[in-house]
Image (tube, grey):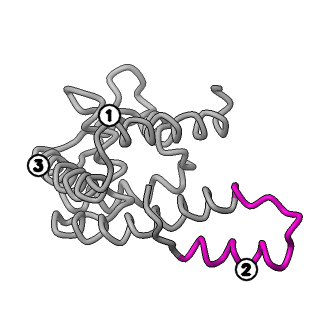
């Protein structure tokens, strides 16, 4: 541990002075999680942009790529993974299709439905973006030892599970 302070320490210090009876651990944790998330977005967004995609497009392409060959999912599967409405997904798919990163195909099992498939260009873009993004994130995490990184990942998993009801 270090004796360094950050903006969250200053904010919680002010609240502690003004409302000394209030516990502030949650504010410390979630204030830092929020700030780290904002910093990470500012770090990652330009990396994705260098590969011709934004964060929203990356999420769709990554869902397809992670699904394994043939890198094809239904729009419902994609929207479920991303917690999006079908309307929210349609705009992303339109943009990705126009860019040649995905293609929409008839569903062989249901003539009324479509399947979304990653193109070779989409696969190239998302693989390059994910590699560059994870590399940049790892450089930030390198302020922690590997053991500290594992502990942090585990603790954040438990907090995340509390939100999803899986805990």
Crowding at mark 2 (Cα within 10 Å: few <14, some 14-19, many 20+)? few
Nearest-to-viewer mark from 3 and 1 = 3
Q: Is residue 103 above or below residue 91?
A: above
Side (left or right) of 99 relative to 116 = left
Q: Is residue 132 left or right of residue 26?
A: left
Residue drawn at (25%, 52%) of the image: 138
Q: Identify the element where label 2 is drawn.
A: helix
Most common SS among magenta residues? helix
The percent coordinates of residue 137 (x first, y second) are 28, 55
Q: Which mark is residue 14?
A: 2
Look at the image and give the residue range highlighted in magenta.
7-26
Does residue 4 lie above or below 55 as drawn?
below
Q: Nearer the viewer, mark 2 or mark 3?
A: 2
* Residue corresponding to mark 1: 106
Measured from the top left, where is residue 14 in percent x and y? 73, 80
Residue at (11, 49) in percent of width and height:
124
| Quadrant of the image occupied by residue 83 | top right
Residue at 19% across, 66% down:
52
Q: Quadrant of the C terminus?
A: top right
Q: Quadrant of residue 74?
A: top left
- Give the foreground label among 1 and 2: 2
Which one is nearer the viewer's eye here, 94 or 47?
47
Q: Nearer the viewer, residue 4 or 14?
A: 4
Q: CA distance from mark 3 to mark 1?
A: 23 Å
Give the mark count. Answer: 3
């Amino acid at each position: 541990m270090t004796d360094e302070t950050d903006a969250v320490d200053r904010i919680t210090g002010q609240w502690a002075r003004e409302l000394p009876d209030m516990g502030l651990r949650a504010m410390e944790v979630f204030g830092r999680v929020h700030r780290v998330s904002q910093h990470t977005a500012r770090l990652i967004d330009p990396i994705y942009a260098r590969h011709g995609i934004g964060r929203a497009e990356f999420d769709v392409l990554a869902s397809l790529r992670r699904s394994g060959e043939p890198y094809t999912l239904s729009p419902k599967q994609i929207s479920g993974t991303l917690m999006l409405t079908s309307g929210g997904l349609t705009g992303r798919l339109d943009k990705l299709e126009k860019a040649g990163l995905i293609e929409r195909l008839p569903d062989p099992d249901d003539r009324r439905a479509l399947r979304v498939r990653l193109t070779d260009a989409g696969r190239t873009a998302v693989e390059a973006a994910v590699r560059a993004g994870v590399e940049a994130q790892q450089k930030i995490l390198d302020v922690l030892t590997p053991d500290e990184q594992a502990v942090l990942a585990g603790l954040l998993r438990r907090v995340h599970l509390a939100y999803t009801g899986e805990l």
